[in-house]
Amino acid sequence: MSSDPNNVLKKLIEYSNKINSKAFNLTRFLILAITSYIKDGIQYRELKTLLNISDGKLKANIDVLQEMGYINKIKVQVDQKSMHIYMVTESGSNELQKIIEWIEILKKE
């Protein structure tokens, strides 16, 4: 831990101002991380299974991330079947990186 707790807190607070507070909750962070990790996109039902959350909670969080431009819902055709997948956008990846960097500050200090 750093020798001066005031400097640590100041650094955390200053860096937290770079993070979009609407994206900074566990569910949204996980959605960003999963869509960033799975480069080909992920279906709604797969996200729901991975996160083990209700439809309402998942839909509400996806809607917020879409409104912010952090994920896209894309219609794809697979074996003559139409479905939607979710993919992270560049701005979503950038926001995810900011959150990860903030977490790294916490880990170091």
Image: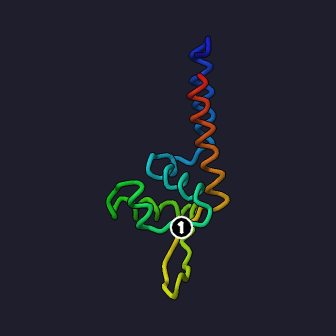
Q: Quadrant of the C terminus?
A: top right
Q: Residue at x 56, y 61 (%)?
A: 68
Q: Measuring 60% from the left and 41% from the top, which residue is drawn there?
A: 100
Which residue is farthest top? Answer: 3
Q: Nearer the viewer, residue 20 or 81?
A: 81
**Which residue matches tag 1?**
86
For the N terminus, the image quarter is: top right
Q: Position of residue 13 (x, y in %)?
A: 58, 31
Colour theme: rainbow
Image quadrant assignment for residue 107: top right
Q: Secondary structure at mark 1?
A: strand
Amino acid type for the residue under numbered disc 1: Tyr
Local packing at callout 1 (Cα closer than 10 Å; few below 14, some 14-19, many 20+) is many
Q: Residue furthest bottom?
A: 80
Q: Position of residue 17 (x, y in %)?
A: 60, 39
Coordinates of residue 45 in the picture (x, y in percent): 41, 67
Residue 21 is left or right of residue 57, and the answer is: right
Q: Give the residue at x 61% y 11%.
A: 3
Give the residue drawn at x 44%, y 67%: 44
